[in-house]
Amino acid sequence: MGNTWTINYLPEDGGRLTGKLSVGADEVRFDALYDSSNKEVIKGILGSVGAFAATGGHAVYVHNTDTDFEIVLPRAEIASAEQVKKGMMKRAVITMTDGSVFVFDYGMLSPKKLIAAING
């Protein structure tokens, strides 16, 4: 993998997973290091419902086991990647050709280099 950033993935139904996002020649890969939201910890206690919720409903791109959570986005299937600001927080939003949306929160730091790497 070429470039790597420590960033937060925000599933569609809420929560926050902190991990490493790597941009390579063929894919964009997010490997979760830990769950950094109280909401997902509570869901995890409830069993597999929490595991499916953490995927944000994108079972095609998300691989979730008891020990690992990763998102693999083939570059050929990425329709767009753009920066979106929400207040002072800056996010990288990746939209797939099937309409799936993946939101990565970079806090107050600019994700411009990340967006350029994905679009490049």
Image (spheres, rainbow, N blue to C red):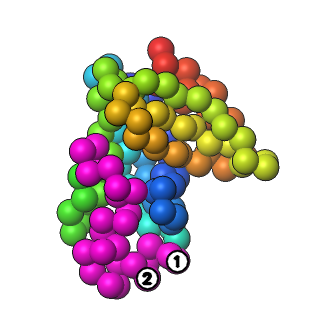
User: What residue appears at the point 46 percent right and 41 percent down from the top-left corner?
Assistant: 101
| Vertical position of residue 52 compared to residue 88: above or below | below
Question: Considering depth in this image, is 116 or 62 the residue closer to the camera?
Answer: 62
Residue type marked 2: Ile
Residue reaching furthest top? 120
**SS class of the residue under badge 2?**
helix
Q: Front-most of 78 and 66?
A: 78
Q: Which mark is residue 42?
A: 2
The image shows residue 40 at horizontal and vertical percentages of 44, 73
Prevailing secondary structure class for the magenta stretch in the rendered image: helix
Asked whether residue 1 appears in the rendered view, the answer is: no
Q: Tell me: 111 left or right of 101.
A: right
Crowd class of label 2 (few under 14; some 14 to 19; many from 20; radius 10 Å): few
Q: Residue 84 bears which disc, if any?
A: none
Magenta span of residues = 38-62
**Is residue 54 shown to the viewer in this render?**
yes
Q: Is 91 drawn above or below residue 57 in the view shown?
A: above
Q: How far from the left and from the top, in percent, is residue 2?
A: 38, 25
Q: Position of residue 111 (x, y in %)?
A: 62, 34
Q: Quadrant of residue 28?
A: top left
Residue at the location (57% across, 38% down)?
92
Q: Which residue is mark 1?
A: 38
Residue farthest along the right direction in this orientation: 87
Residue type (three-letter) at the residue carrying disc 1: Asn
Q: Residue at x 32, y 84 (%)?
A: 46
Q: Residue at x 50, y 76 (%)?
A: 39
Q: Is residue 112 left or right of residue 95?
A: right
